[in-house]
Image (cartoon, grey):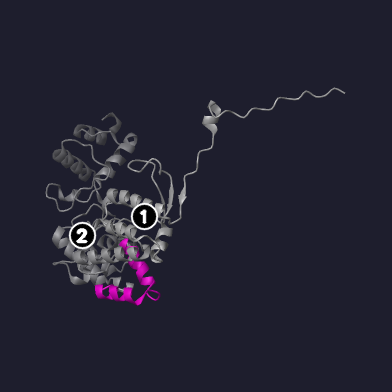
């Protein structure tokens, strides 16, 4: 028998060869979950970087924090996972170094996530009341962003209407001290108080008309808590009320529909009520004010601004312009010529 030739052993690639360099496994970034002194000092370092780059007065790291792969984070730590919850537990058990705790307290590090969330909710409610005079928060209300004048940055974007609903549903399980805090604020536990009578709706529409000389109410409009608005209408989401009245038009009692007709109620909604001339007037006015027709997508004609024709108030002009461009091929030639004469921009890419 002939013996089979023995194949030479396959050499393992040298660490210097290209294939090894390209295919070698990448080292795993550490998950820092122990509360050793070294890791405590690392937490302080990371928390300070977060504090320096945050917009709020607090340093609030999530329970699991992954170091971002970007400046100003140290290259050696990028991608590392920090188990912040372990340090919070260590804090509760008084196992952290006193100097570390003091350093983190100095930058208002959030030790108790639940307590911090509660304080922010309370802060938002206090701010809402200072602005509106009550806590009848509409369900759809979201704290505006970039409003340094009225709202603390820590609560920007908070869905306060939903927060209120959650607080109402948790009334039976809520700690008594928190309920006492809400009672002291004037919190409205019974959502039924938010239900509006026909008389309140009519009073709000009548007041709106006396102020604005029309009832083209924007969908986002909420009645302010000031005179001359009747107190029973304060914080009413009048834009939503108007929308629901339009939806229920066919089932409204005749006498109620007649009352709305007397006010000049717009049954078909603002978009459908706009005439072609209204749209042209809005575009013409925008050009007079800005010198061009490059209308931002989010632009809406302001209400109660005498620079704008009354019939154009509330028009979402940015959306309108986008729709005109999209439907250019189906547009009657006379209308296209009118827009061309205004200097309408059909293709923004060319600008």
Residue 248 lies left or right of residue 317; in this view the side is: right
- Residue neighbourhood size for the residue with mark 2, other residues' Cα within 10 Å, grouped as few (<14), some (14–19), many (≥20): some
What residue sits 40% from the left and 63% below the top? 95
Q: In x, y percent, where is residue 251?
A: 34, 66
Q: In x, y percent, where is residue 21?
A: 52, 30
Q: 121 or 311: which is nearer to us?
A: 121
Q: In x, y percent, where is residue 215?
A: 21, 59
Say whether residue 203 is magenta. Answer: no
Secondary structure mainly formed by the magenta segment: helix
The C terminus, quarter of image: top left
What residue sits 20% from the left and 33% below the top? 343
Residue 289 lies left or right of residue 267; in this view the side is: left
Span colored in magenta: 159-187
Residue 162 in which image quadrant: bottom left
Asked which secondary structure carries label 1, the reply is loop
User: Which numbered disc covers residue 61?
Assistant: 1
Q: Is residue 21 above or below residue 100?
A: above
Residue 223 lies left or right of residue 34; in this view the side is: left
Residue 181 in which image quadrant: bottom left
Q: Are marks 2 and 1 in contact (CB under 8 Å)?
A: no
Q: In x, y percent, where is residue 272?
A: 28, 50
* Residue 334 visible somewhere in the drawing: yes
Instruction: Name the residue beneath numbered marker 2.
Output: 264
The N terminus, quarter of image: top right
């Amino acid at each position: 028998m002939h013996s089979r030739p023995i194949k030479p052993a396959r050499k393992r690639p040298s660490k210097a060869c290209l294939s090894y360099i390209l295919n070698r496994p990448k080292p795993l970034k550490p998950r820092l979950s122990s509360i050793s002194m070294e890791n405590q000092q690392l937490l302080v370092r990371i928390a300070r970087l977060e504090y320096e780059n945050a917009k709020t007065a607090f340093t609030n790291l999530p329970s699991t924090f992954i170091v971002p792969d970007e400046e100003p984070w140290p290259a050696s730590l990028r991608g590392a996972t920090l188990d912040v919850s372990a340090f919070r537990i260590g804090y509760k058990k008084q196992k952290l170094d006193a100097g570390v705790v003091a350093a983190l307290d100095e930058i208002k590090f959030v030790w108790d996530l639940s307590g911090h969330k509660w304080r922010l909710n309370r802060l938002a409610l206090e701010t809402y009341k200072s602005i509106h005079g009550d806590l009848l928060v509409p369900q759809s209300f979201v704290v505006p962003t970039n409003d340094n004048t009225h709202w603390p940055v820590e609560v920007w974007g908070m869905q306060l209407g939903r927060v209120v609903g959650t607080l109402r549903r948790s009334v039976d399980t809520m700690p008594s001290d928190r309920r006492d805090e809400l009672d002291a604020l004037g919190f409205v536990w019974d959502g039924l108080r938010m239900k509006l009578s026909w008389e309140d709706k009519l009073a709000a529409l009548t007041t709106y008309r006396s102020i604005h000389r029309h009832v083209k109410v924007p969908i986002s409009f909420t009645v302010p808590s000031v005179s001359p608005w009747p107190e029973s209408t304060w914080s009413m989401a009048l834009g939503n009320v108007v929308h629901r009245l339009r939806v229920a038009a066919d089932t409204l009692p005749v006498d109620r529909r007649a009352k709305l007709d007397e006010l000049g109620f717009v049954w078909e909604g603002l978009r459908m009520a706009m005439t072609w001339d209204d749209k042209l007037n809005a575009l013409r006015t925008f050009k007079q004010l800005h010198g061009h027709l490059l209308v931002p997508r989010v632009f809406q004609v302001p209400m109660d601004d005498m620079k704008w024709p009354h019939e154009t108030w509330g028009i979402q002009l940015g959306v309108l312009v986008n729709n005109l461009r999209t439907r250019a091929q189906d547009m009657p030639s006379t209308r296209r010529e009118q827009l061309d004469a205004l200097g309408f921009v059909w293709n923004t890419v060319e600008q």
